[in-house]
Image: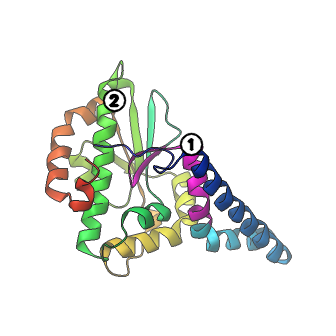
Amino acid sequence: MRIPDRYYGLHPAFAWLISLVMAGFGLMVTFAVFEVDDSLGFFGDMLGLLLIAPLLMFLWTPFIRVAGWYKYYSPLFLVFGESKTRIEIHSGPSVDYLLHLRGIPPGKELQRTVLAFYLQGLLNIADKVASSEDPATVEIVGTSYFFSDRSVERMGFQVSPGGWLHRINLVFSFLELFLLNSLSAGKVKVPNIFKVKKASMSGERLLEHREYIQRLYDRMATERNRAWE
């Protein structure tokens, strides 16, 4: 499976230029929100940030990726703050949907493509873990809201209730999650951020379930996914 490079396939200087311009717009929008909501105090600022969070994520993601803080393992599957013993996995934000899912109508095909990109990411992480000194010491952790608990457990994850930090993060991501969930489902789908689950497993357990994940990917992959093999 191919792993996306941090520069979007562009020359590094050009990628930096575009990402800095977009991040600059993001800062301008943020300052504007604080200025407009100044009379409403702290809660006004938080409400403003909540409403514009999807736009800010769209504008800041390229800079975060080019800077190397986001490491992508497939077009819609990334890791933030990777270390030798911990891999925290996340789904790609809206800018990645725009780049990689254009032309796919909302509904079943788009949903399959999204889920297969997640599986691609897991397979690439499994290959990375396989080359580590001790896969048993590597913890892979993420938030489960696209897969059912049963599906996640079949892939080797252990599911437990998410903490308050997960919930707070998802509150600020609510509008974006609502949009992406609805696009994937082909209908209005409101994410229940208060029932978020934490999914975790060791690298050793991931390797034990790699064959199952590969079979699942082979059944779900669309033409768009195959282009990244």
**Place of residue 211 in the rendered image (x, y in percent of width and height, measured from the top left):** 16, 39
Query: Which residue position is annotated with label 2?
Result: 129
Q: Is residue 149 visible?
A: no
In the image, residue 43 sits, relative to residue 204, either above or below, namely: below
Rendered position, 69 above or below 167: above
Residue at 23% x, 72% y: name it: 108
Q: How many angstroms separate mark 1 from mark 2 (CA)?
A: 19 Å
Q: Residues within 10 Å of mark 1 (few under 14, many from 20)?
A: some
* Residue bounds of the magenta highlight: 56-79
Numbered disc 2: secondary structure: helix
**Amino acid beneath label 1:** Trp
Which badge, 1 or 2, is on the more N-terminal residue? 1
Q: Characterize the local packing of mark 2: few (<14), some (14-19) or many (20 or more) Cα atoms within 10 angstroms.
A: many
Based on the picture, tell me whether residue 114 belongs to the magenta stretch: no
Can residue 137 be seen? yes
Return the x and y of residue 209 as percentages of the image width and height. 20, 38
Q: The residue under label 2 is which amino acid type?
A: Val
Q: Find out whether residue 65 is within the magenta segment.
A: yes
In this view, the residue in front, 101 or 190, is: 101
State which quadrant residue 97 falls in.
bottom left
Tag 1 residue: 69
Where is residue 64 drawn, in percent x and y? 59, 49
Q: Secondary structure at mark 1?
A: loop
227 vs 123, nearest the viewer = 227
**Residue 49, quarter of picture:** bottom right
